[in-house]
Image: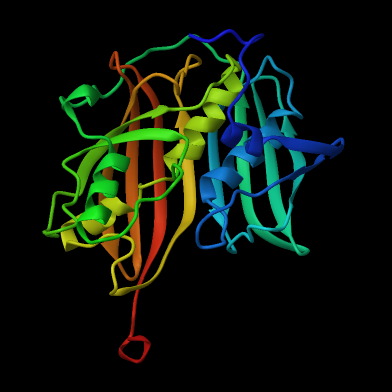
Amino acid sequence: MTDENSTVDGPIIQSLKIEQLDRLLFRGTPNQWPNRHVFGGHIVAQAMEAATATVDPKYKLHSLHSYFMRPGIADLPVIYDVDPIRDGRSFVTRRVVAIQNGEAIFSISVSFHVGEDGVSHQIDMPEVPQPEELEDDEEYYSRILRAVGKAPKNKPFLPFEMRSVDRMDLENLQPKDPVSGYWLKLKEPVSDDRDLHARLLAYVSDFAFLSSNLRPHAMIPRDARLKTVASLDHAMWFHRDRIRVDEWIYYKTEGYWTGKGRGLARGAMYARDGRLLASVAQESLLRLKKDDDK
């Protein structure tokens, strides 16, 4: 556990912070992504913070539904325009539009609930190897790069440690079951802010998710046969108030359907003790190259 008063958030978390320009207007800095676009989870997390800043703390985040409309540009600030479309007794809803160059690149509806008593159950966590039994994903990718004579990256790709269950073998790609998953845990220091942990869970939920749609086809997102791979929309439901991303979380991913140049994936995020923390769904664009693109 960390002490909220003494912990300094790490550099990636610092880069997620937004500035309030007016009562319903905010500005954020995009992340530096290798392809010069902006990681979708980064925009989701910043938009969530903008929405949360306009809501009474007695209302707790319970769901979000978002659409990615244009690629974000890595060297331009992002403006977040919050629309307070509903303030009810039990539910509060905010719509946020992310803007660059005067154009909407992303929109999200975020819902908050006071929380009530009710019946309770969940689908149990599957039996999977524990993180200590699995190779770290960055170590695996570094080993593959060295095997083909390339130097591994000097800095981590994400602030999360990830350990995949039944990963795709990059040296011998074969069709695999679309149902798999991985363990994840934040590497950086983080304070005890519950809203921040929820935002970071949404941040990482967009990473390596659409890959589940490609597994049955023996493909990865950088497959030479693919022209465009991108998230189209992203939805998430939060089931618990206590979420800690600096403890191991298992992310079960399911490539539920793929066709017509799109893929639908579903996910479930579990604490190590088996509590279901959140559910996720996403449709992605999986556009194949045409003959004249090759």
Q: Position of residue 87 (x, y in %)?
A: 74, 28
Instruction: Name the quarter where the C terminus is drawn.
Output: bottom left
Where residue 170 appears, x then y in whole percent? Answer: 19, 56
Answer with the quarter of the image where residue 19 lies: top right
Residue 52 vs residue 64: left or right? right
In the displayed image of the protein, which residue is found farthest to the right?
Answer: 22
The outermost residue toward the bottom is 292
What x and y, as percent, mark residue 272? 30, 17
- As drawn, is 202 to the left or to the right of 266? right
Looking at the image, residue 251 sits to the left or right of residue 99; the answer is left
Q: Residue at x 43, y 39 (%)?
A: 205
Left or right of 106: which side holds 205? left
Total labels: the figure holds 0
- Identify the residue at image location x=69%, y=45%: 96
Vertical placement of 22 versus 174: above or below? above
Please name the residue shown 42% across and 34% down the image: 160
Where is residue 221 shown, x and y percent of the image?
33, 61
**In the image shown, does 163 or 206 lie closer to the viewer?**
163
